[in-house]
Image (tube, coloured by chain):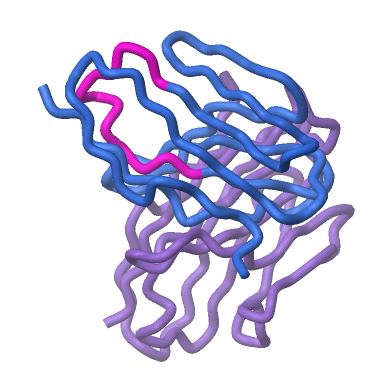
Amino acid sequence: KNEVEQSPQNLTAQEGEFITINCSYSVGISALHWLQQHPGGGIVSLFMLSSGKKKHGRLIATINIQEKHSSLHITASHPRDSAVYICAVSKTSYDKVIFGPGTSLSVIP
Amino acid sequence: EPEVTQTPSHQVTQMGQEVILRCVPISNHLYFYWYRQILGQKVEFLVSFYNNEISEKSEIFDDQFSVERPDGSNFTLKIRSTKLEDSAMYFCASSGGTGGADGYTFGSGTRLTVV
C-alpha cells in the first residue's frame, strides 16, 4: 500500500471553477507538503503545513491530522493553474519527503 | 526569496560515463537531499545528507551513486558508469530542519538523459 494517496488522478475543470484535490496518508507525520510541477519538470513548494489551514492567494490547504487527510483547494481556477499537484509528507521537519503520485489538473478556458 | 540552484538544467551523457550533478542549497540550511523522478513516475527519495555525512539512503542509492559537499556551498551527486535507466529528472532540496520558514525548498531539477 502506498504511504501517500491522492485523488483524483486526473482532473479537468472549466476556468473559474472551484477545485479540490485530496490527499490521504498512512504514516505519522510532522509536515505535509503541497507541491506544483509544471511541464518541463521543476517542483515549486506551495505549502508546508502541520495543522489547520493555510491560504496563499487563490490556494487554500487544509489538514486533518486525526483523519490523516489533507485537501488543496483552488478558487477561481485559471488555465495557468494547469499542472501536476503533488502531496508529500515527512515524518519530521528534516526527514526525507515521501511523495504521492500527483494529480494532473487541466483548466480549460 | 532564497533558491536552491541546480546545474546543469539538462545533461546528455553516453552510457557508461560518469556524471556529476551540482546543487547550491540555501545558505543557512543544514539538511540536503537528492530525489529523482523517472518520466511518468512519482518522485523518489535517493539520499539525505547532514553534518557532512549521509543520514539516510534508499535502496536505489547503491554503489553507483555518491554525494559530496566539497565546500561550504555546493552539494553534488555523482553517478558512475551511467545506465539507460538512470535517465530521469534529479531534484536537489534543502531544509533548515525546523519547519516553517526553514521548510523544504526544491531546486528546479537536472534532466539527465543517458544515450
Q: Residue at 35% x, 48% y: name it.
A: A41
Image location (x, y in percent) of residue A40: 28, 47
Q: Nearer the viewer, residue B84 or B43?
A: B43
Q: Residue at 55% x, 35% y: name it.
A: A34
Colour assignment, chain B: purple
Describe residue A16's horizontal placement relative to residue A22 as left or right.
left
Instruction: Classify the position of the C terminus of chain A by image quarter.
Output: top left
Q: Residue furthest left?
A: A109
On screen, B69 above or below A88?
below
Boundaries of the magenta span: A74-86
Q: Residue furthest front?
A: A67
Image location (x, y in percent) of residue B94: 68, 43
Q: Nearer the viewer, residue B82 or A9?
A: A9
Q: Residue at 57% x, 60% y: name it.
A: B35
On screen, A51 above or below B84?
above
Chain shown in blue? A
Q: Nearer the viewer, residue B62 or A108?
A: A108
Image location (x, y in percent) of residue B40: 33, 64
Describe residue B14's horizontal placement relative to residue B80 as left or right.
left
On screen, B78 above or below A79?
below
Image location (x, y in percent) of residue B41: 41, 65
Quadrant housing residue A32: top right
Quadrant housing residue B75: bottom right
